[in-house]
């Protein structure tokens, strides 16, 4: 099974952090909601090749929890 990124939304600063295989990426936002932050994070992960969005379990998904 391929490792999956961890995505953390900070409700105070409205930013999101992505942790994957020793890499930490911060998306500054500010994001108005957890849903918009998670969508941006998943888009960033897909762009970097960290997330296979064509996988049936993730297709159309905006949340990883």
Image (cartoon, rainbow, N blue to C red):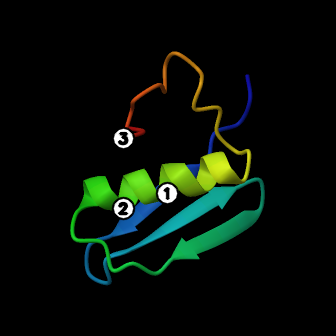
Q: Is residue 43 depicted above or below 19 in this figure?
A: above
- What secondary structure is found at the residue carrying circle 2? helix
What is the quadrant of residue 9 in the picture?
bottom left
Residue at screen point 31% across, 77% down: 14
Q: How far apart are marks 3 and 1 (CA)?
A: 10 Å
Crowding near the residue tagged with mark 2, few <14, some 14–19, many ≥20 C-alpha atoms within 10 Å: many
What is the quadrant of residue 33 in the picture?
bottom left
Relative horizontal placement of residue 40, taking residue 43 as reference (left or right): left
Please give the label number shown on residue 41.
1
| Position of residue 58 measured from the top left corner of the image (x, y, whole percent) | 49, 27
Please give the label number shown on residue 61.
none
| Position of residue 35 measured from the top left corner of the image (x, y, whole percent) | 28, 53
What is the quadrant of residue 50 in the picture?
top right
User: Is 42 or 65 nearer to us in this picture?
Assistant: 42
Of the residues under marks 3 and 1, which one precedes in the sequence?
1
Q: How far apart are marks 1 and 2 (CA)?
A: 6 Å
Please give the label number shown on residue 63.
3
- What secondary structure is found at the residue carrying circle 3? loop
Query: On the image, numbered disc 2 is attached to which residue?
Result: 37
Q: In which quadrant of the rendered image does the C terminus lie?
A: top left
Query: Quick one: which residue is furthest to the left in this view?
Result: 32
Of the residues under marks 2 and 3, which one precedes in the sequence?
2
Q: In which quadrant of the rendered image does the N terminus lie?
A: top right
User: Is 46 or 6 nearer to us in this picture?
Assistant: 46
Relative horizontal placement of residue 19, taking residue 10 as reference (left or right): right
Relative horizontal placement of residue 38, taking residue 53 as reference (left or right): left
Residue at screen point 26% across, 73% down: 11
């Amino acid at each position: 099974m391929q490792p999956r990124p961890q995505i953390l939304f900070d409700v105070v600063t409205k930013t999101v952090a992505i942790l994957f295989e020793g890499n930490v990426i911060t998306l500054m936002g500010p994001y108005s909601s957890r849903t918009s932050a998670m969508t941006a994070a998943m888009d960033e992960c897909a762009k970097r090749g960290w997330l296979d969005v064509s996988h049936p379990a993730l297709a159309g998904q905006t949340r990883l929890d």
